[in-house]
Amino acid sequence: MTDFSRVLMVVNPISGGIDKSDIIEEVKKQVKEKGYDLDIYYTTGKDDKEALFSKIENYAPHRIVSVGGDGTIKLIAELLKDDSVPIGIFPAGSANGLAENFNLHGSDEYLAEVALGDKFEIMDSILINNELCLHISDIGLNAELIKNYQEGNIRGKLGYLLKSIPTLIKSDFPFQFEIQVDGKIISRNAVLIAVANARKYGTGANINPHGRYNDGKFEILIFKEFNIPEILKTFSENAELDEDFLEIISAEEARIYSDKKIPFQIDGEYRGDISDVTASISPVKIKIAVP
């Protein structure tokens, strides 16, 4: 690859509750073998945006490798704001939705080869309530689970599992929504509404089976009821979901209202209880290293 010599690795040390040392060593090894230079930034949760922006400006990397979850990739994308620098992904978070959608599974050695490789996909992004969204945002039951998870002490998928039953018991779903899209206002009762640029949640649930991340549109996913058999069907690669369970609307911009404030999340991060969501396709494109 021409003009490729500097790699910046961005590591979230606490994401997913897992040790990242083996990943870091594998990336170091392959970077050294290729004759590249490597710098590492460890997120702290405090002033990361400013510190990482300064690091990118001064180091001018040709590749950024994200070692964390969707939030780490989002942090990088917000600072790049274009597709000039490819992002390599190591799925090492509590939820790894983008990695799931790009089929990034396998050994550390394999993932490092992909992250430093020369095959890419360009993906859209969505501007949701003036914040960049790469994967999936939602309002309702799933965001309520994420809220409860982030308030807990146990990381990883076990933490989500432990919070799922209490969330279902305490939640006040279904919620009442109005959706403004294509000059129309649609009223729906739903357990959650998602705005999706991707097909799958990090769990592997295929909630947007016909979605594409590079078509200049996003999908509004209206989950009308809590239906366990239909939820289980989403874990099939070729899921065909009942219209009484899921309604899908393709859009370039939309607005979603609820009759009361409801938990809301963007790319797996709880963003408060709100009653108004605006979404539009962003001009920002992101280049991802893929298998």
Image (spheres, grey):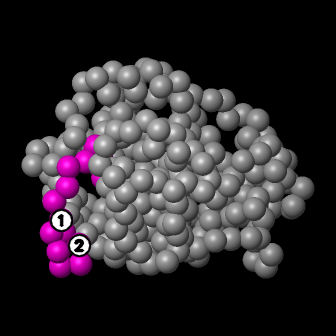
Across and down, in percent, residue 61 comes to 64, 65
The disc labelled 2 sits on which kind of residue?
Answer: Val
Q: Disc number at residue 186?
A: 1
What residue do we see at 9% from left, 49% from top? 259
Is residue 121 visible in the rendered image? The answer is yes
Which circle's residue, 1 or 2, is located before the other in the chain? 2
Across and down, in percent, residue 284 comes to 44, 74
Find numbered disc 1 in the image and state the secondary structure of the residue it sits on. Answer: strand
User: From the viewer's perspective, is 211 left or right of 142?
Assistant: right
Q: Is residue 185 magenta?
A: yes
What residue do we see at 66% from left, 48% from top? 90
Q: Is residue 162 above or below residue 285?
A: above
What residue do we see at 47% from left, 59% from top? 208
What residue do we see at 72% from left, 34% from top? 21
User: From the viewer's perspective, is 64 left or right of 108?
Assistant: left
Q: Which residue is mark 2?
A: 181
Q: Is residue 179 above or below residue 246?
A: below
* Mark 1 crowd level (few <14, some 14–19, many ≥20, 10 Å Cα): few
Is residue 266 visible in the rendered image? The answer is no
* Mark 2 crowd level (few <14, some 14–19, many ≥20, 10 Å Cα): some
Magenta residues: mostly which secondary structure? strand
Q: Which residues are magenta?
A: 180-193
